[in-house]
Image: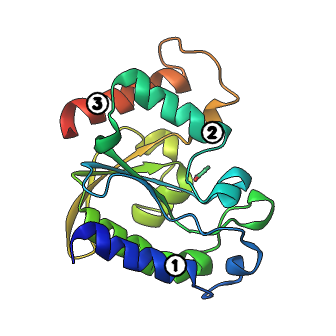
Amino acid sequence: MNIKEQLNEIKKQAKNCFNCPLSENRTNTVFSDGCEQAPVMFIGEAPGKNEDETGIPFIGRAGQLLRNYLKEIGFKENDIYIANTVKCRPPENRKPSKKEKEACEFFLKKQIEFVNPKIIVLVGSTALESFIDKKTTITKARGQVFEKEFAGKIRKFIPIFHPSYLLRQHSERDGSPRFLFKKDLINIKENFI
Ligand code: URA
Protein backbone atom coordinates (compact mmCIF):
# COMPACT_ATOMS: atom_id res chain seq x y z
CA MET A 1 0.00 0.00 0.00
CA ASN A 2 1.27 3.50 -0.77
CA ILE A 3 1.00 6.41 1.69
CA LYS A 4 -2.33 7.62 0.29
CA GLU A 5 -3.88 4.17 0.61
CA GLN A 6 -2.52 3.69 4.12
CA LEU A 7 -3.92 7.04 5.20
CA ASN A 8 -7.25 6.17 3.63
CA GLU A 9 -7.37 3.04 5.77
CA ILE A 10 -6.73 5.13 8.90
CA LYS A 11 -9.36 7.62 7.76
CA LYS A 12 -11.90 4.81 7.48
CA GLN A 13 -11.06 3.72 11.03
CA ALA A 14 -11.53 7.31 12.27
CA LYS A 15 -14.91 7.47 10.53
CA ASN A 16 -16.04 4.47 12.54
CA CYS A 17 -14.35 5.48 15.80
CA PHE A 18 -16.41 5.64 19.00
CA ASN A 19 -13.48 5.86 21.42
CA CYS A 20 -14.67 9.09 23.05
CA PRO A 21 -17.95 10.94 23.64
CA LEU A 22 -17.24 13.47 20.86
CA SER A 23 -18.25 10.76 18.39
CA GLU A 24 -21.84 10.86 19.68
CA ASN A 25 -22.69 14.28 18.25
CA ARG A 26 -20.61 14.38 15.10
CA THR A 27 -22.02 14.84 11.62
CA ASN A 28 -18.67 14.00 10.03
CA THR A 29 -15.25 13.08 11.30
CA VAL A 30 -12.82 15.70 10.06
CA PHE A 31 -9.69 13.81 9.12
CA SER A 32 -7.53 15.97 6.86
CA ASP A 33 -7.18 18.18 3.82
CA GLY A 34 -4.28 18.60 1.44
CA CYS A 35 -1.41 16.58 0.11
CA GLU A 36 -0.23 13.38 1.81
CA GLN A 37 3.35 14.11 0.73
CA ALA A 38 3.41 17.74 1.81
CA PRO A 39 6.50 19.18 3.49
CA VAL A 40 4.35 21.30 5.84
CA MET A 41 1.72 19.81 8.14
CA PHE A 42 -0.66 22.10 10.05
CA ILE A 43 -2.28 20.83 13.25
CA GLY A 44 -5.18 22.87 14.59
CA GLU A 45 -7.36 22.42 17.66
CA ALA A 46 -10.61 20.74 16.68
CA PRO A 47 -13.34 20.93 14.05
CA GLY A 48 -15.97 23.65 14.41
CA LYS A 49 -19.49 23.79 13.00
CA ASN A 50 -18.54 24.25 9.34
CA GLU A 51 -15.89 21.56 9.57
CA ASP A 52 -18.33 19.12 11.22
CA GLU A 53 -20.86 19.80 8.43
CA THR A 54 -18.39 19.36 5.57
CA GLY A 55 -15.76 16.97 6.93
CA ILE A 56 -13.02 19.42 5.86
CA PRO A 57 -10.65 21.07 8.39
CA PHE A 58 -10.19 24.85 8.49
CA ILE A 59 -13.08 25.66 6.16
CA GLY A 60 -14.98 28.16 8.37
CA ARG A 61 -14.11 31.84 8.95
CA ALA A 62 -10.85 31.21 10.81
CA GLY A 63 -9.88 28.54 8.30
CA GLN A 64 -10.52 30.88 5.38
CA LEU A 65 -8.32 33.48 7.02
CA LEU A 66 -5.48 30.95 7.31
CA ARG A 67 -6.01 29.72 3.75
CA ASN A 68 -6.05 33.29 2.36
CA TYR A 69 -2.73 34.08 4.03
CA LEU A 70 -1.22 30.83 2.73
CA LYS A 71 -2.33 31.71 -0.79
CA GLU A 72 -1.09 35.28 -0.55
CA ILE A 73 2.33 34.07 0.65
CA GLY A 74 2.56 31.58 -2.21
CA PHE A 75 1.96 28.16 -0.64
CA LYS A 76 0.77 25.68 -3.25
CA GLU A 77 -1.76 22.87 -2.74
CA ASN A 78 0.99 20.26 -2.71
CA ASP A 79 2.88 22.11 0.02
CA ILE A 80 0.38 21.56 2.82
CA TYR A 81 -1.46 18.89 4.76
CA ILE A 82 -3.99 19.97 7.42
CA ALA A 83 -5.28 18.07 10.46
CA ASN A 84 -6.47 18.68 14.03
CA THR A 85 -5.68 17.33 17.50
CA VAL A 86 -9.14 15.70 17.53
CA LYS A 87 -11.27 14.61 14.59
CA CYS A 88 -14.75 15.33 15.97
CA ARG A 89 -16.31 18.63 16.99
CA PRO A 90 -16.47 19.38 20.72
CA PRO A 91 -19.85 20.76 21.86
CA GLU A 92 -20.12 24.58 21.80
CA ASN A 93 -16.60 24.65 20.30
CA ARG A 94 -15.02 24.10 23.70
CA LYS A 95 -11.42 22.92 23.85
CA PRO A 96 -10.99 19.15 23.60
CA SER A 97 -10.19 17.51 26.94
CA LYS A 98 -6.98 15.62 27.68
CA LYS A 99 -8.91 12.35 27.52
CA GLU A 100 -10.45 13.23 24.15
CA LYS A 101 -7.06 14.15 22.76
CA GLU A 102 -5.58 10.92 24.06
CA ALA A 103 -8.43 8.91 22.54
CA CYS A 104 -7.66 10.52 19.17
CA GLU A 105 -3.87 10.47 19.36
CA PHE A 106 -3.57 7.21 17.47
CA PHE A 107 -4.93 8.87 14.30
CA LEU A 108 -2.73 11.94 14.54
CA LYS A 109 0.32 9.80 15.19
CA LYS A 110 -0.36 7.78 12.06
CA GLN A 111 -0.92 10.96 10.05
CA ILE A 112 2.43 12.37 11.18
CA GLU A 113 4.18 9.05 10.58
CA PHE A 114 2.85 8.62 7.05
CA VAL A 115 3.00 12.24 5.88
CA ASN A 116 6.41 12.61 7.55
CA PRO A 117 6.51 16.39 7.02
CA LYS A 118 9.63 18.54 7.24
CA ILE A 119 7.86 20.82 9.71
CA ILE A 120 4.75 20.51 11.87
CA VAL A 121 2.97 23.81 12.40
CA LEU A 122 1.10 23.91 15.71
CA VAL A 123 -1.84 26.21 15.14
CA GLY A 124 -2.81 27.81 18.44
CA SER A 125 -2.45 26.92 22.11
CA THR A 126 -4.25 23.55 22.11
CA ALA A 127 -1.87 22.07 19.55
CA LEU A 128 1.07 23.77 21.26
CA GLU A 129 0.16 22.25 24.64
CA SER A 130 -0.33 18.81 23.10
CA PHE A 131 3.18 18.65 21.67
CA ILE A 132 5.52 21.04 23.43
CA ASP A 133 4.85 22.29 26.89
CA LYS A 134 1.79 23.06 28.97
CA LYS A 135 3.51 25.96 30.69
CA THR A 136 4.56 27.99 27.70
CA THR A 137 2.21 30.40 25.93
CA ILE A 138 1.58 30.83 22.25
CA THR A 139 2.78 34.44 22.48
CA LYS A 140 6.16 33.29 23.80
CA ALA A 141 6.54 30.17 21.69
CA ARG A 142 5.27 31.31 18.28
CA GLY A 143 7.81 31.43 15.51
CA GLN A 144 10.35 29.25 17.32
CA VAL A 145 11.37 25.83 16.05
CA PHE A 146 11.17 23.06 18.67
CA GLU A 147 12.71 19.64 18.13
CA LYS A 148 10.98 16.74 19.88
CA GLU A 149 10.69 13.01 19.50
CA PHE A 150 7.27 11.99 18.21
CA ALA A 151 6.01 8.95 16.29
CA GLY A 152 9.40 7.30 16.04
CA LYS A 153 11.77 10.17 15.27
CA ILE A 154 12.94 13.65 16.19
CA ARG A 155 10.60 16.11 14.51
CA LYS A 156 10.51 19.88 14.06
CA PHE A 157 7.53 21.84 15.38
CA ILE A 158 6.72 25.53 15.03
CA PRO A 159 3.80 27.15 16.87
CA ILE A 160 1.82 29.99 15.28
CA PHE A 161 -1.19 32.02 16.44
CA HIS A 162 -4.59 30.46 15.86
CA PRO A 163 -6.41 32.30 13.03
CA SER A 164 -9.57 32.62 15.17
CA TYR A 165 -7.57 35.03 17.36
CA LEU A 166 -6.79 37.11 14.27
CA LEU A 167 -10.47 37.45 13.40
CA ARG A 168 -10.60 39.97 16.24
CA GLN A 169 -7.25 41.65 15.40
CA HIS A 170 -7.42 43.51 12.13
CA SER A 171 -4.22 45.55 12.05
CA GLU A 172 -1.23 44.33 10.04
CA ARG A 173 1.16 46.96 11.34
CA ASP A 174 4.64 45.98 12.57
CA GLY A 175 4.46 43.77 15.65
CA SER A 176 0.69 43.18 15.48
CA PRO A 177 -0.64 39.58 15.72
CA ARG A 178 -1.45 39.51 11.98
CA PHE A 179 2.01 40.86 11.16
CA LEU A 180 3.64 38.12 13.30
CA PHE A 181 1.35 35.44 11.86
CA LYS A 182 2.34 36.41 8.33
CA LYS A 183 6.01 36.64 9.28
CA ASP A 184 5.90 33.10 10.74
CA LEU A 185 4.23 31.70 7.62
CA ILE A 186 6.78 33.42 5.36
CA ASN A 187 9.61 31.90 7.43
CA ILE A 188 8.02 28.46 7.16
CA LYS A 189 7.73 28.78 3.40
CA GLU A 190 11.30 30.02 2.99
CA ASN A 191 12.86 27.38 5.25
CA PHE A 192 10.81 24.22 4.73
CA ILE A 193 9.51 24.16 1.16
N1 URA B 1 -10.18 25.61 14.12
C1 URA B 1 -9.36 24.55 14.25
O1 URA B 1 -8.51 24.53 15.12
N2 URA B 1 -9.49 23.57 13.38
C2 URA B 1 -10.37 23.59 12.39
O2 URA B 1 -10.40 22.63 11.63
C3 URA B 1 -11.21 24.70 12.30
C4 URA B 1 -11.11 25.69 13.16
Q: Secondary structure at mark 2?
A: helix
Q: In the image shown, does 106 or 11 lie closer to the viewer?
A: 11
Q: Position of residue 94 (x, y in %)?
A: 74, 61
Quarter of the image with the C terminus in it = top left
Mark 1: give few (<14), some (14-19) or many (20+) Cα within 10 Å.
many
Q: Position of residue 101 (x, y in %)?
A: 55, 74
In depth, the one of 2 and 49 nearer the eye is: 2
Q: Are marks 1 and 3 in contact (CB under 8 Å)?
A: no
- Which image quarter: residue 48? bottom right
Q: Residues within 10 Å of mark 3 (few under 14, many from 20)?
A: few
| Left or right of residue 89, residue 59 in this image | left
Residue 68 higher or lower than 51, as above or below: above
Name the residue at the top extreme. Answer: 173
Instruction: Say which residue appears at 60% left-offset and 60% top-offset.
Output: 55
Query: What residue is shown with label 1?
Result: 14
Q: Amino acid under label 3?
A: Asn
Instruction: Name the kind of residue labelled 1 in the image.
Output: Ala
Q: Which residue is mark 2?
A: 62
Respond yes or no on whether mark 3 lies under 8 Å from ligand 1.
no
Badge 2 density bin: few <14, some 14–19, many ≥20, Cα 10 Å? some
Indicate the quadrant where residue 133 lies: bottom left
Is label 1 or label 2 in front?
Answer: 1
The residue depicted at 29 percent of the width and 66 percent of the height is 4
